[in-house]
Amino acid sequence: MSCRYDESLDAIIFDHLVPASNIYQGMYEFYGPNGTYDAYFKKKNMWMLKEDIEPKNPRKKNELPSKN
């Protein structure tokens, strides 16, 4: 599981967790990441959940954009 604070977005980004199988619903020790991400964004001194975001790695200083 990944959980990190992104300064540029002022958000806490983390893996969306799901049960390994429906029989494990509610048994959180059997949950794992499914490849999507959720985030908490700070709005008016409150953290608001936004599901299914697409995080991007920040560009490093002096790094040129790719030519794809």
Image (cartoon, rainbow, N blue to C red):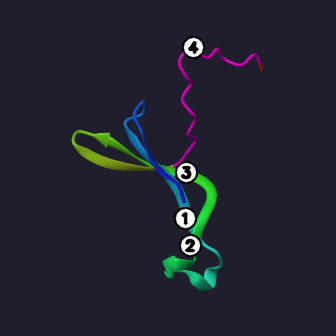
Residue pushed farthest bottom? 23
Residue underneath mark 2: 31
- Spatial distance from mark 2 to mark 4, Cα to Cα? 39 Å
Most common secondary structure along the magenta stretch: loop
What number is the disc on residue 66? none
- Residues at badges 2 and 1 in contact (C-beta under 8 Å)? yes
Going 55% across and 64% down the picture, which residue do you hit?
17
Going 55% across and 40% down the picture, which residue do you hit?
55
- Spatial distance from mark 2 to mark 1, Cα to Cα? 6 Å
Mark 2: which amino acid? Answer: Tyr
What number is the disc on residue 37? 3
Mark 3: which amino acid? Answer: Tyr
Badge 1 local density, few (<14 within 10 Å), some, or many (20+)?
some
Mark 1: which amino acid? Answer: Leu
- Spatial distance from mark 4 to mark 1, Cα to Cα? 35 Å
Up-down: is 22 above or below 67? below
Quadrant of residue 57 within the rendered picture: top right
> Which stretch is magenta?
52-67
Quadrant of residue 56 within the rendered picture: top right
Q: Circle 1 sits in a helix, a strand or a loop, which is it?
A: strand
Going 39% across and 34% down the picture, which residue do you hit?
7
Q: Circle 2 sits in a helix, a strand or a loop, which is it?
A: strand
Q: Position of residue 29 (x, y in %)?
A: 52, 78
Mark 4: which amino acid? Answer: Asn
Residue underneath mark 4: 62
Please identify, in this view, whether the residue under mark 4 or under mark 1 is nearer the observer.
4
Q: Position of residue 35 (x, y in %)?
A: 64, 55
Residue underneath mark 1: 17
- Spatial distance from mark 3 to mark 2, Cα to Cα? 14 Å
- Residues at badges 3 and 4 in contact (C-beta under 8 Å)? no
- Position of 60 with respect to 48 (left or right) is right
